Image (spheres, rainbow, N blue to C red):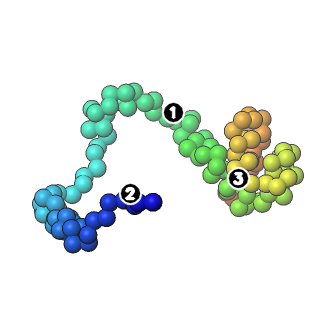
Amino acid sequence: MKDRVKRIPIEDLKENNEHSDQQKPSDDVPGAELKPKTNEELNAEKPARKERRQATEAELNNPLHGVKLAEILERLVAHYGWEYLAERVKIRCFSNNPSMKSSLGFLRKTKWARIHVEDVYLDMLEEQEN
């Protein structure tokens, strides 16, 4: 059976790659740093971005505001452990072979369980304040 791959001599490869060691024209421009865009510039580019609703004062004062469910569960497991969570919130994903993935999947689908876990998290925050 013949080789279907065309063999290229190493010398030819070296000749073709000589230009890759040279600097790009943008590399030698002094002060050409990447500058982050301001909110005004981003809003001008995408007008739909400007229409986002700002958080109200009540939302900002809520301790759950901006905290993801995964963060809540990670903090609870680190603070209490799976055994305590299984006793406090009676769901199987905490008692039988607990894992973050299965627990997060269940809590995202089941509102009553998520509310119970959020209550435990709020209790933990109050505990830590005192």
Q: Nearer the viewer, residue 103 or 115?
A: 103
Q: Looking at the rendering, which quadrant does residue 27 occupy?
A: bottom left
Q: Which of the two discs, 1 and 2, labels the residue nearer the N terminus?
A: 2
Percent of width and height locating residue 49:
38, 31
Q: Disc 2 marks which amino acid?
A: Arg
Q: Residue furthest bottom?
A: 11
Q: Secondary structure at mark 1?
A: loop
Q: Is residue 77 above or below residue 10?
A: above
Percent of width and height locating residue 70:
64, 49
Q: Nearer the viewer, residue 119 or 129?
A: 119
Q: Nearer the viewer, residue 82 or 126?
A: 82
Please name the residue shown 37% across and 27% down the image: 48
Q: Which of the two discs, 3 and 2, labels the residue nearer the N terminus?
A: 2
Mark 3 vs mark 1, foreground winner is: 3
Please name the residue shown 56% across and 36% down the image: 59
Percent of width and height locating residue 1:
45, 60
Q: Mark 1 and mark 3 in contact (Cβ < 8 Å)?
A: no
Residue position for label 3:
100
Q: State the quadrant of the C terminus.
A: bottom right
Q: Is residue 7 left or right of residue 72?
A: left
Percent of width and height locating residue 58:
57, 35
The 10 Å Cα crowd at callout 1, few under 14, some 14 to 19, many 20 or more, is: few
Q: Mark 2 and mark 1 in contact (Cβ < 8 Å)?
A: no
Q: CA distance from mark 3 to mark 2?
A: 49 Å
The 10 Å Cα crowd at callout 3, few under 14, some 14 to 19, many 20 or more, is: some
Say the numbered circle drawn on residue 4.
2
Say the numbered circle drawn on residue 56.
1
Q: Is residue 120 left or right of residue 88?
A: left
Q: Disc 3 marks which amino acid?
A: Met
